[in-house]
Amino acid sequence: MEETERINLVLDDEKFEKVAFILKTIGHPVRLKIISYLSKYGSMSVNDICEKCEVEQSLISHHLNNMKLKGIVSSQREGKSIYYSIKLEEVLTVINCMSKCDI
């Protein structure tokens, strides 16, 4: 990579901590899929997320509960269904940065 192509990464300690927290929390392929779908569709039921991710409900629920406990997503009950959405907006910034990577 040429010197002109390099990106100067300047973050303060607070940003490093926040980005590290987000990456640790969403750093699993299923969680990344969930966040990706929630960013695209806004709010989704657990069943809808299961269909999109093609993963069993128990595994999706496990990941959603973990992300909810850490403040990444929020939930709202409507009848028998629980709908999830992104709570921590900075997650979208991290996802947008990752989507620009050519890996």
Image (tube, rainbow, N blue to C red):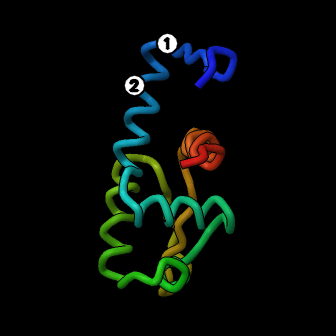
Q: Earlier in the sequence, mark 2 or mark 1?
A: 1
- Please tell me whether mark 1 sits on a helix, a strand or a loop: loop
Where in the figure is residue 30, as x and y percent of width and height? 41, 66
Where in the figure is residue 61, as x and y percent of width and height? 35, 73
Q: Quadrant of the N terminus?
A: top right
**Quadrant hosting residue 16:** top left
Q: Residue 12 got which mark?
A: 1
Where in the figure is residue 62, as x and y percent of width and height? 30, 69
**Quadrant hosting residue 38:** bottom right
Check disc 1 and give the amino acid type.
Asp
Extreme residue in the front direction? 2
Question: For the residues marked 2 and 1, what is the alpha-carbon distance in whole angstroms?
Answer: 9 Å
Q: Look at the numbered discs 2 and 1 and tell me whether their residues touch, using CB distance below 8 Å.
A: no
Of residue 101 and residue 98, the one placed in the foreground of this image is 101
How busy is the neighbourhood of tag 2: few (under 14 within 10 Å), some, or many (20 plus)? Answer: few
The residue indicated by pointer 2 is 17
Where in the figure is residue 52, as x and y percent of width and height? 55, 80
Check disc 2 and give the amino acid type.
Glu
Of residue 60 and residue 2, the one placed in the foreground of this image is 2
Query: Relative to residue 26, is residue 48 drawn left or right?
Result: right
Identify which residue is drawn at 30% across, 80% down. Answer: 58
Of residue 2 and residue 25, the one placed in the foreground of this image is 2
Query: Relative to residue 67, is residue 44 drawn left or right?
Result: right
